[in-house]
């Protein structure tokens, strides 16, 4: 990919890029919708991601080319507004540029920019955070600036919250920034504090991407965010992480039926993340898997962000030998299911799961066997 993007850059811009960066996609391992509630979460950075190549220009033109759309879009450096005309991926690098001054950093002026990706989109693997981090590293490099990893992660989140307009937490950018091969990234989102936890050798990730997506997915994410904040208010805490499961149960009569279920999911899910860290340390993948499947059940029945298709995949996978556990990964409302399996689970079993799904829904999920990889870097 590194040579490919340099060659593509040369073909389009007739010169070498000044810098090439790469940031990985991520799998949400466990901790569903805990991040913006100040909780804990575990994620894995994967061996696929986004590559960005950039070179500064003398003038104030910004030429963006990506293989996502196959076209170049030229904007003047004075243009800092959100793009709405079908080239919306540009909002990720533009959002990063708009975020830099908020961190005391200087925004780049004119540049040529090329992006490439080997991340499947719509699979809940967070290509947007990968674009943000790869772009952020590249813009810092061409302006001769340096930021620590935590600042880079926060710049990406700022772009997403304030420019793109998604009230997401720090999971996606945190995992893409702090990822390490053969490890999970642990985030205590209140600090935030980042750590890594070794992944036992027999842990294999399989992604089943249904390509289904609820038409209102962005609005539903924002609605869940709102419900959680409302529940926190009724409970008298600033974020749900400060409430105990007993407090949530005690406030059942004061919370709306939905707010109660959302809050119950969040506080119990945070406890599951902490239990997962403990059983991971013992290398007990069966116990880890049980927690993953319990997390899915909670998304299904309490948080209300699963779908019939995702539930079917989890049910089928949970009944398949050599699968430790399975759950929806990411925001939900469609997308993908992640299974944690042993090395004995192979393509034949994965295809059998896809067969069963196809028989029921008339469409086949994509199957991806994922490896972990390192976090964002200049390559
Ligand atoms: C999306 C968001 C994350 C997180 C997950 C749900 O991936 O971008 O911040 O909230 O959903 O856990």
Image (cartoon, rainbow, N blue to C red):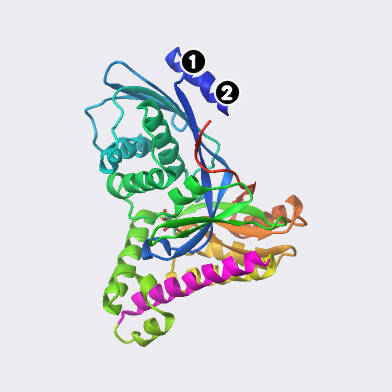
Looking at this view, name the residue that lies furthest to the right.
344
Asked if residue 254 shows in the view, the reply is yes
> In the rendered image of this protein, does residue 36 appear above or below residue 126?
below
Whole-percent x, y for residue 199 in the image: 64, 56
- Tell me: 25 left or right of 183: left
Magenta residue span: 255-282
> In the rendered image of this protein, does residue 192 appear above or below residue 122?
below
Looking at this view, name the residue that lies furthest to the left.
78
Q: Crowding at label 2, few (<14), some or many (≥20) Cα neighbours within 10 Å?
A: few
> Cβ(mark 2) to ligand 1 < 8 Å?
no
> In the rendered image of this protein, does residue 3 appear above or below residue 226?
above
Q: Compare residues 216 and 330 and report the one nearer the observer.
A: 330
Q: Which residue is mark 1?
A: 11
> Ligand 1 quadrant?
bottom left
* Residue drawn at (47%, 45%) of the image: 177
Q: Which residue is mark 2?
A: 3
């Amino acid at each position: 990919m590194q040579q490919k993007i340099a060659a593509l850059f040369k073909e389009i811009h007739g010169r070498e890029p000044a810098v090439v960066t790469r940031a990985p996609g991520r799998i949400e391992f466990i901790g569903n919708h805990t991040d913006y509630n100040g909780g804990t979460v575990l994620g894995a950075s994967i061996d696929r991601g986004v590559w960005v190549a950039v070179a500064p220009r003398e003038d104030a033109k910004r030429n963006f080319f990506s293989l996502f759309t196959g076209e170049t879009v030229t904007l003047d450096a004075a243009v800092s507004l959100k793009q709405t005309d079908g080239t919306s991926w540009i909002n990720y690098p533009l959002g990063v540029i708009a975020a830099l001054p908020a961190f005391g950093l200087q925004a780049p002026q004119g540049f040529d920019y090329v992006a490439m990706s080997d991340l499947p989109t719509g699979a809940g693997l967070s290509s947007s955070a990968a674009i943000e981090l790869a772009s952020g590293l590249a813009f810092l490099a061409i302006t001769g600036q340096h930021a620590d990893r935590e600042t880079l992660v926060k710049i990406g989140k700022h772009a997403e919250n304030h420019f793109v307009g998604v009230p997401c937490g720090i999971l996606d950018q945190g995992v893409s920034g702090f990822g390490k091969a053969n490890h999970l990234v642990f985030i205590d989102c209140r600090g935030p504090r980042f750590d890594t936890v070794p992944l036992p050798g027999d842990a294999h990730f399989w992604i089943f991407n249904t390509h289904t997506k609820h038409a209102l997915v962005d609005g539903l994410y924002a609605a869940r965010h709102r419900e959680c904040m409302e529940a926190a208010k009724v409970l008298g805490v600033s974020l749900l992480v400060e409430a105990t499961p007993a407090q949530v149960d005690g406030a059942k009569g004061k919370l709306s039926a939905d707010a109660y279920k959302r809050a119950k999911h969040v506080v119990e899910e945070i406890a599951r993340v902490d239990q997962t860290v403990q059983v991971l340390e013992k290398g007990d993948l069966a116990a880890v898997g049980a927690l993953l499947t319990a997390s899915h059940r909670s998304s299904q029945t309490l948080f209300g962000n699963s779908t019939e298709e995702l539930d079917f995949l989890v049910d089928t996978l949970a009944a398949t030998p050599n699968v430790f556990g399975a759950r929806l990964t990411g925001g939900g409302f469609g997308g993908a299911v992640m299974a944690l399996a042993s090395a004995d689970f192979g393509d034949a079993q994965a295809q059998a799961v896809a067969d069963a799904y196809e028989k029921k829904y008339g469409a086949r999920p994509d199957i991806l066997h994922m490896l972990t990889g390192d976090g964002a870097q200049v390559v």
